[in-house]
Image (spheres, rainbow, N blue to C red):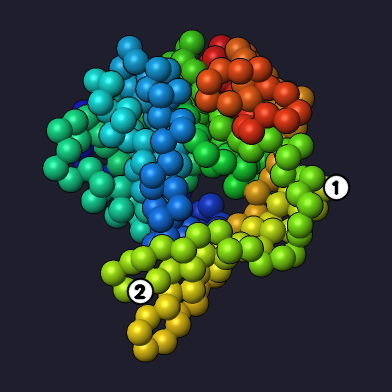
Amino acid sequence: MTRGEADTLGLAEAQGGGRFAELERLARYYDLRHGAYVEDLAFYRDLARGSHLVLELGCGTGRLLMPLADEGVAVLGVESSPAMLCRARSRLEGQEAADRVQLVRADLRRPVCRGASLALLALNTFNHFGHREEQVQVLEAARFSLSSGGRLVLDLPNPHLELERGVQGACVLEQVTDTDEGVLYEWSVTEVDRAAQRMRLRCVYDLARPDRIIRETCLAELYLFYRPELELLLERTAFAVEGVFGDYDGSDYEEGSPRMLAVARAV
């Protein structure tokens, strides 16, 4: 597989205009918060080892693409946002294993390939699909793209922790970063609807330039899955759940676990 970028049917706009627009705004700041996140790298590299094709659904700015390609496997990164893909492309430039990576702009609810050994939706990607119909569509598309026996990984926040957040509606300073344009202040405001299992997250970015302050905001709504419903969804879409883990070290999932990682096999 050679490196490149392809378009496929059902582009990002089909995923919903509002969500697509938020992704475009978020791309500018995404790597400042998540670009250096490495806690999950060993977990995914171990799973990818020995695969012939790894499919990352919602690859964002490409944080995981090179670590996966370094395992000697072909990697297909799928993303709906052109701005995210542009940054992923830049990240690949000059990398030794970049020729094993291909980028595809596509709607995650539609299949993009056949015969993948491993498919993954990392770091809350699946939570952005808040309606049952589209959740099923994403899982069915992943199942179509996998070979029989291929694995799917869903990396989700622990709903018990997120739904019990003590402070809601408060503006919290998350990070201060020096950039070429000025000092960037990142704030967040979180609201939780326990009955609907939804978390609304508003990120506010204040870029303090010498002459003025520029503010941008991004709004994301995450659906928070409980383990039983997630397992039922996977079984409904022809997956057999192999395990649900509470962190990247493979520990058992419990109420206080930092993450909820579901690993399932295509049947």
Q: Quadrant of residue 212?
A: bottom left
Quarter of the image for the C terminus: give it: top right
Q: Residue at x 55, y 59 (%)?
A: 174
Q: Residue at x 56, y 32 (%)?
A: 155
Q: Secondary structure at mark 2?
A: loop
Residue highlighted by disc 2: 182
Task: Tell me which numbered mark, 1 or 2, is placed earlier along the sequence.
Answer: 2
Closer to the eye: label 1 or 2 = 2
Quick check: 163 left or right of 90?
Answer: right
Q: Secondary structure at mark 1?
A: loop
Spot occupied by residue 199 in the image (x, y as percentages of width and height): 71, 52
Residue type pointed to by label 1: Ala
Q: Nearer the viewer, residue 91 or 209?
A: 209
Spot occupied by residue 8 in the image (x, y as percentages of width and height): 36, 44
- Is the residue 66 above or below the residue 218 in the image? above
Residue highlighted by disc 1: 195
Residue type pointed to by label 2: Gly
Q: Nearer the viewer, residue 204 or 196?
A: 204
Quick check: 137 left or right of 208?
Answer: right
